Amino acid sequence: MNALRKHIDKIKPNFAKGSKLGFLNSTFDAFESFLFVPNKVTKGGSHVKDSVDLKRIMTAVIISVLPAVLFGMWNIGYQHNLAIGGDMGFWPIVLYGFLKILPLYLVSYIVGLGIEFTSAQIRGHEVNEGYLVTGMLIPLIVPVSIPLWMLALAVAFAVIIGKEVFGGTGMNIWNPALLARAFLFFAYPGHMTGDKVWVAGLQKDAIVDGFSGATPLAQISDGLGSIQYSFSDMFFGFIPGSVGETSTLAILIGAFILIYTGVGSWKIMFSCVLGALTIGFIANIFALSEASILAVPAYYHLVMGGFAFGAVFMATDPVSSAQTEKGKWIYGFLIGAFAVTIRLFNPGYPEGMMLAILLMNTFAPLIDYYVVEGNIKKRLKRAKTV
Amino acid sequence: MYNFAPSFVNNLLLNKYIMLDHIRLKKGLNIPLKGEAFQKITKTVVSDVIAVKPTDFVGLIPKVLVSEGDSVEAGTPIFADKKRPEIVFCSPCSGVVDAIVRGEKRKLMEIRIKADACTKYIRYDVPKVESVNKGEIINLLLKSGLWACIKQRPYGIVANPEVTPKSIFISGMNTAPLAADLDFVLEKEFEILQVGINVLAKLTKGGVHLSLDASNYASTDLHKFNNIIYHSFSGPHPAGNVGVQINHISPINKGEVVWTVDLHLLVAIGKLFVNGVYDMSRIVAITGPRAINPSYIKCVSGMSMNDISEYVDNEKGDVRIISGDILSGEDVGSEGFLGFNNNQITILPEGNYYEMFGWVKPFRLKKFSISRTYFSWLTQKKKYEMDTNTNGGERAFVVSDVYSKVLPMDIYPVYLFKAIMAENIDKMEQLGIYEIIEEDVALCEFVCPSKINIQSIVKKGIDMMIREME
């Protein structure tokens, strides 16, 4: 450790601004602060600062996503095995999933971090750690069969247009990971929808009879009876879908970590569920027949598609969500409500969660504006009564 | 509740012994720092050199009234407020002006006075407090230099003597990290404080408000004053900040002015009206993880840190000597001087070291954090040896809900900070700039995971408001 520190101290001057490798200053700094907590001390103001920093918070998010990653990895292999009617054991299934998910992560991180480092370098800023989380999330919300060049394009779009043009981490309006998905969804709909994309190897390998590869969300348009999967299958995640979204259980473990550490807002998650259930119940009341999409029990929406993943990992993004505590209730509730509304009334877009969150990202500042305005009015009123 | 006493007796009891309004604050944080001062006076400092620092006063532009080589007495004006020359700042000791120290752009940093062995005081004729009128009080306070003890809100600047404040607020509880124990420091000053309170009471129609800690209300002598309105507070820091207390008792609206006085400075006002001298002696707590034998000392304001070098443990590495507490004190260095408003010195280890993979280590049990991504919340009673490392690089605002958890006021802190950064005066006004000063948001800065210097943002906002309002 000391030897490494000495070596870094030795080469450090080369990367100082103005010297030979000065153009790599931000990159050097990023690697150095990755290896060592810097020796920077406080100046003026509070002389002591809390031990938590964004790196630590982002690490907590990454840990909370891990159950979903691991389950997703297994489920890729499991679904493939079902599709080909094979008899792969546990480890071959995991290995298959690992080999499928690895390229997604490589592309996500190489492209995303490459852009982050470059833009930090151009601006002369420190490299922000925001992409560590975004890069972790993007492969989890795309179909496993997505061509890698499309993923690369989507990542580039999300990081450049979604984040860097606004000024980097902390300044973006939309959740960058979801923006990558939205980009794919509208640019290459053929690779993001239908029954063929959700399971690895469906296009090439021989499929056993009766395996459809359709997600439950695609099936509900004809009512509950047409869903092939049981509620418990959907809850545990033995269903086709985007890589990390299928297992509500794994996501709940993540939610527990986020809430426990205080990194994710329980208010947003809770109100999101509340919003979905509310619209779900209303739809149930107005369902004309069992075969209607409206008759799908409200709680089914919580375990289908990307609802749980979106509510726990996407809606709670501290940058693009509502910032005020009151605002979070409204924001979360409307996400849940819109997501289910889109699912029920616009079967053309079976996954309403993505659009609901992006829509509410857009309106979050407006919600906050009215909450803060309320505080201002209160202050003015107080002045008048005295 | 069994209550058989007639209602007027009850009211009397309530007024006198039980608080009328008890305000319970939940938000905030007591930082568990090591090095609390032991309740004993271990030294009486006799200083060689003493300094008076204009930088102790927010927004002050000083005009020097002495030159090097002049001899002064305790109470001789050293510099005045350029905008209101009637407000003067005085030497706490007698001696010779040793140096007039200027910093960048010739900004006046401090005036050093070489002290006599025996202090000679300027003596004032003291009027009887019962019969003296408001004008006479103000004149005497201005002339003696003790006006500087009275601050005004908004902004935390030295009060304008031409304005009559809505009321005057005093905090009788000190919740800042390792703060001096007021009961101990003021033990023998009870009667002097009563005189000070009587003086203040003549300056306002809204009364003098004293807020006490609910937990030791019965045991402290501070609840026995007359001519005062009591409030009781409970909760973690910043519950003891007078700004937070005002916000809950009677918040400041646009156009309103209230005054605040620190209790240990009120002692000096009391002494003026009892003994007729400018006596800035005080009891100061020496605290912090790098303080040897943390305890109390007797000294005067402006004391040199050279005089307490035996309390500084610099064998284990660099240390920082702070006049005040870790949240909003000033780094004065080992050659610096005690601030006018401070009755605490904190000695901290500097954090200028590298820690390999520090942020990713799962436990780091020696690190304190309000965040549950660490485990310090499991060990509630543990005290930590904190240092001055920033514990991370500066970033944009990302996590938005941490700040309001340590600010017990009805204010949206991030919106206020952003309004200041955008230099939007209207928004600053609407979002509550009048109700806070730097120390009230110091905890926001402490907990900020983006390591933003929030106090300097607020300072910038307050400076902007002062300029705008002129």
Image (cartoon, rainbow, N blue to C red):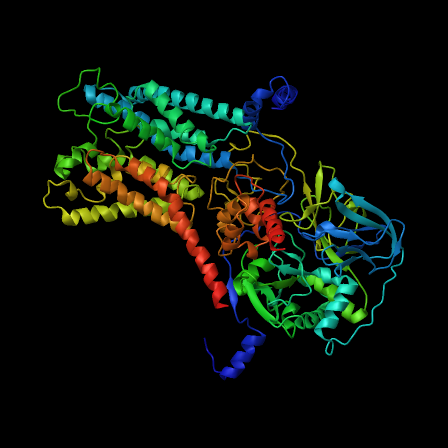
Residue B285 screen position, x and y as percent:
71, 54
Query: Is B384 in front, or is A310?
Result: A310
Q: Residue at x 47, y 60 (%)?
A: A380
Q: Residue at x 75, y 52 (%)?
A: B62
Residue B172 screen position, x and y as percent:
63, 63
In the displayed orientation, state which residue is furthest to the bottom.
B6
Q: Is residue A143 visible?
A: no
On the picture, is A20 further left or further right than A251? Answer: right
On the picture, is A214 further left or further right than A258? Answer: left
Q: Residue at x 23, y 47 (%)?
A: A279
Residue B158 screen position, x and y as percent:
68, 58
Residue A48 screen position, x and y as percent:
61, 43
- Give above or below for B272 relative to B68: below
- Give above or below for B465 relative to A133: below
- Give above or below for B19 relative to A131: below
On the picture, is B445 further left or further right than A375? Answer: right
Query: Is A379 in front, or is B318?
Result: A379
Q: In which quarter of the view is residue A125 placed?
A: top right
Q: In which quarter of the view is residue A364 placed?
A: top left
